[in-house]
Image (cartoon, coloured by chain):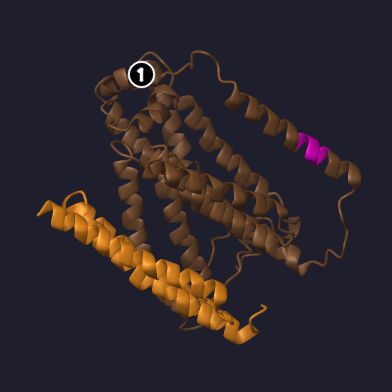
Chain colours: A orange, B brown
């Protein structure tokens, strides 16, 4: 049981790391701000989501797990809104503003 | 080489790189952003050193709050034309020499530590049980070195006075000139409506848990300040003018409570800032909550900057 949970953690965190890597490559390689933002949102949603999912079996009790999930939800919220704000500013002032 | 030490070495290399680029980069805005990233990496380093309290403070104050203050300082510089007015050579030389001196003395302190390292940590752990606290950092801050903590809060108020005195006479007592980013129905408005209740809860939790585990007044206060600034920036509530008496009362509320309990200690426990035995923990929790409110307001007002317009009567 314990081994299965550990394997699950390693698999899910590795999958999350893949999205972090992909998002970082996107941030460095994509041509304009909007597509770069798009790459970053994948890191927030899927990357962090999978890392948190993988860490849940290792969490310190139910409250520890709830704290992890709320960290993910808060990052989701702030990430989505900051992305919107940056994109709105890019649209209004152009990429150099 | 073990996995954690590979991580640590990578972290240190990253920090050195980011630190260097914060100094080398010519654009002030980019330098501030790099500085914030440096603060976040530094807080990771504190986590690796098992100093969670310091890590939380570094992330909140070093990365977040200082970053916001620096951004506030960069914004007017971008508007004002500073066409090529470079600092003179002697000033730059003096800066370089002073920085090199600080770096050299730090290097000496780290490279040639004394034979026996003086530490009071075992004494703290032995006496911690008497205070009723579980967090040794809270024990040091509020019991063993309470005077330092009290003075630190007063310094925060002095810093705020320094910022406020930058106001021209005509707007003294007016409203801080924080930039408002609100557009009606923007997502920022949504965030400023949704996040503050969550943030207030987290701040109260941080402050309460500080007696037992990592957390405390500074961390909780920073989150409260951030929530307040968010509401102001989203234009849901305007910044208060600095001559409001409730604002000034709340600013001194925390240090005043601390001082009153400290003076009461002379009568009740025979020493300034001592707590009567058995009442240490409840008194410290009272002080922490009072300080959280004052720290939150002081930090928010520091970030809001000097007054720029007069209050409409």
Q: Nearer the viewer, residue B184 or B174?
A: B184
Instruction: Decide if residue A95 is on the left or right side of residue B41.
Output: right
Extreme right residue here?
Answer: B89
Extreme front residue here?
Answer: B1
User: Label 1: which residue?
Assistant: B122
Mostly what secondary structure, the magenta segment?
helix
Q: Is residue B264 above or below residue A5?
A: above
Question: Which residue is at 64% across, 64% downward?
Answer: B177
Task: Give the percent coordinates (x, y) of residue B111.
Answer: 59, 25
Q: In this rendering, does residue B243 appear at all?
A: no
Q: Is residue B186 above or below residue B210?
A: below
Chain letter behind tag 1: B
Quadrant into which the C terminus of chain A falls: bottom right
Q: Check disc 1 and report its element: helix, strand or loop.
A: helix
Question: Which residue is at 66% across, 58% downward?
Answer: B31
Which residues, given as a range, are shown in magenta? B94-98
Q: Nearer the viewer, residue A79 or B286?
A: A79
Q: On the image, which quarter does residue A81 sit in? A: bottom left
């Amino acid at each position: 049981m314990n081994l299965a949970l550990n394997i699950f953690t390693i698999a899910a965190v590795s999958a999350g790391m893949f999205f972090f890597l992909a998002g970082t490559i996107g941030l460095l390689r994509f041509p304009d701000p909007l597509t770069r933002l798009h790459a970053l949102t994948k890191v927030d949603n899927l990357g962090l989501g999978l890392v948190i999912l993988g860490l849940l079996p290792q969490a310190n009790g139910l409250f520890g797990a709830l704290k992890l999930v709320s960290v993910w939800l808060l990052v989701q919220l702030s990430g989505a809104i900051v992305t919107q704000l940056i994109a709105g500013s890019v649209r209004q002032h152009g990429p150099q503003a | 080489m073990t996995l954690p030490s590979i991580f640590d070495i990578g972290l240190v290399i990253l920090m050195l790189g980011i630190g260097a680029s914060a100094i080398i980069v010519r654009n002030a805005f980019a330098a501030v952003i790099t500085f914030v990233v440096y603060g976040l990496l530094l807080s990771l380093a504190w986590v690796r050193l098992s100093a969670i309290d310091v890590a939380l403070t570094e992330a909140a104050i070093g990365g977040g709050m200082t970053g916001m203050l620096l951004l506030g300082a960069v914004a007017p510089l971008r508007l004002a034309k500073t066409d090529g007015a470079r600092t003179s050579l002697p000033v730059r030389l003096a800066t370089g020499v002073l920085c090199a001196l600080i770096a050299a003395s730090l290097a000496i302190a780290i490279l040639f530590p004394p034979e026996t390292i003086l530490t009071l940590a075992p004494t703290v752990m032995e006496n911690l049980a008497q205070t009723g606290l579980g967090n040794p950092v809270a024990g040091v801050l509020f019991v063993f070195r309470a005077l330092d903590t009290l003075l630190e809060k007063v310094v925060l108020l002095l810093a705020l006075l320094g910022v406020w005195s930058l106001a021209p006479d005509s707007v003294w007592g007016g409203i801080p000139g924080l930039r408002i980013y609100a557009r009606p129905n923007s997502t920022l408005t949504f965030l400023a409506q949704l996040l503050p209740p969550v943030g207030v809860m987290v701040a109260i939790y941080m402050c309460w848990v500080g007696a037992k585990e990592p957390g405390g007044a500074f961390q909780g206060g920073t989150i409260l300040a951030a929530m307040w600034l968010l509401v102001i920036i989203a234009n849901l509530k305007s910044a208060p003018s600095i001559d409001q008496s409730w604002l000034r009362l709340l600013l001194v509320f925390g240090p005043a409570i601390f001082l009153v309990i400290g003076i009461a200690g002379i009568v009740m426990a025979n020493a300034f800032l001592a707590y009567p035995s058995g009442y240490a923990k409840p008194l410290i929790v009272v002080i922490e909550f009072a300080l959280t409110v004052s720290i939150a307001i002081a930090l928010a007002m520091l970030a809001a900057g000097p007054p720029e317009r007069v209050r409409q009567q």
